[in-house]
Amino acid sequence: MANPTISNKCQSENIGRISYWLGGMLIVILLAACGKVQEKVQEKVQEKVQEKVQEKVQEKVQEKVQEKVQEKVQEKVQEEVQEEVQEEVQEEVQSKAQEDKAARHFLDYRGVSLAGAEFGQGSLPGTYGRDYIYPEAGSTAYFAAKGMNLIRLPFRWERLQPELNQPFDVEELKRLKSFVSEVTASGMYVLLDPHNFARYRDDVIGSPSLPTAAFGDLWSRLAKEFKANPKVMFGLVNEPHDMSTEDWVAAANEAIRAIRATGATNTITVPGNAWSGAHSWSRDYYGTPNAEAMLKVKDSGNNMLIEVHQYLDSDSSGGSQDCVDSKIGVDRLSGFTAWLKKYHKRALLGELGAADNKVCREALTAMLDHLHANADVWTGFAWWAAGPWWNDYFLSIEPAAHGKDKPQMDVLAPYLPRKKAPSGTR
């Protein structure tokens, strides 16, 4: 029979071993579980850290973006404010400059050529109303209201005097006198301008077929018609060219002699040769320079102005809308101005004009400033041109529909004393 004590002891040892083994296994299991828990915790911590980092990064990025946006907005606002301030200051400066100009002495003659009666030179004498037209006298009220006081009136010698050395055409003279009478009655001057380039049809004054005496006859008859009106000025002819300067001087002297022989004391304007350009006054490509030959023009009435024309494009013709540069007007007038001062002469800028663009506006302003700065020798200017038939001609300052100003009037305005427009005028 087995010993119960030994059996119980064995059982106890087995139970101990099993418990020890189970405890070890439990520890291993617990340790493994703890490792998993630690890994899970670590993952969660890492996730939270990453989220927090991402949030911080996003916050920093947003802050940086906001700062950049604010900087850009501020820069843009600053630029816009600066531009606005600069524009306001510029406007104030320009306004002050215009006020300063307006406060100074204005030139004696400020005007425009009203074209139309010289049109249709290829159809002489032509049909009135189809080939040519006289401007309406009432149309000058617009220019008077702007501060102008001179209307240069181009017309054709051949229409007024169809035959040399013979009486004027009755109807043409009536048109001419009607315009002159009405305009001068309003207080404006009218400068008569036979727009013939020192020619009658194709014959040049001083040639055998057109002797200077015929030119003198024209002016003798015109002087008799208008000598009683001191508001009428006598412009001998428009732009002589392609002829001997000496022949032109002889013709001018004959016309002046004929005018004064009638007892007329009206102001006479005398152009030079070579299109009467101020820029070429001292040049000799056309023969004897005007600067030399025109010193021989004499007026017994001592009431004579030299008339020159000046445009601002490359060839001084006025045919292009492009002005050379902003100083070209002054450059082209300066030599002639010096000549006037040296020989104690006075002048009228009988034609000037330019298109509406930045360079031309600056050049015109400088040119007009030059005239005013030398008012001891410059008596005035006449813009080329206006009139009823110009349509979209880029030099025309004929007002548009409803009296709207052409852009060049803004350039001229500081040099014109403004007047109140008569009631009922455009």
Image (cartoon, rainbow, N blue to C red):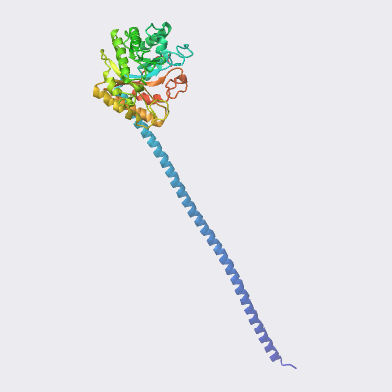
- Drawn side of residue 256 relative to residue 361, left or right: left
Q: Is residue 34 left or right of residue 331?
A: right
Q: Is residue 181 above or below residue 244?
A: above
Q: Find the residue positioned furthest to the bottom.
A: 1
Frontmost residue, 414 versus 339? 339
Q: Quadrant location of residue 297?
A: top left
Q: Residue furthest front?
A: 208
The residue that appears at 61% across and 73% down in the rendered structure is 32
Count of numbered tags: 0
Of the 4 image quadrants, the one containing the C terminus is top left
- Let me know if residue 99 appears in the view: no
In terms of depth relative to the viewer, which is nearer, 184 or 50? 184
Q: Is residue 181 above or below residue 317?
A: above
Where is the N terminus found, in terms of image quarters? bottom right
User: 251 or 50, which lies in front?
Assistant: 251
Q: Residue at x 44, y 25 (%)?
A: 394
Tell me: residue 66, above or below residue 294: below
Q: Is residue 50 visible?
A: yes
Seen at 28% across and 21% down, the residue is 293
Residue 125, given in percent of the width and then of the height, sits at 45, 11
Q: Nearer the viewer, residue 187 or 19?
A: 187
x and y percent of residue 158 in the render?
A: 41, 12
Q: Most extreme residue toward the right, as rendered? A: 1
Taking the image as shown, residue 104 lies to the left or right of residue 34, namely: left
The residue at 62%/76% (across/down) is 28
Where is residue 419? Give x, y as percent: 36, 18
Expressed as whole percent of the image width and height from the top left, the position of residue 93 reads 34, 32
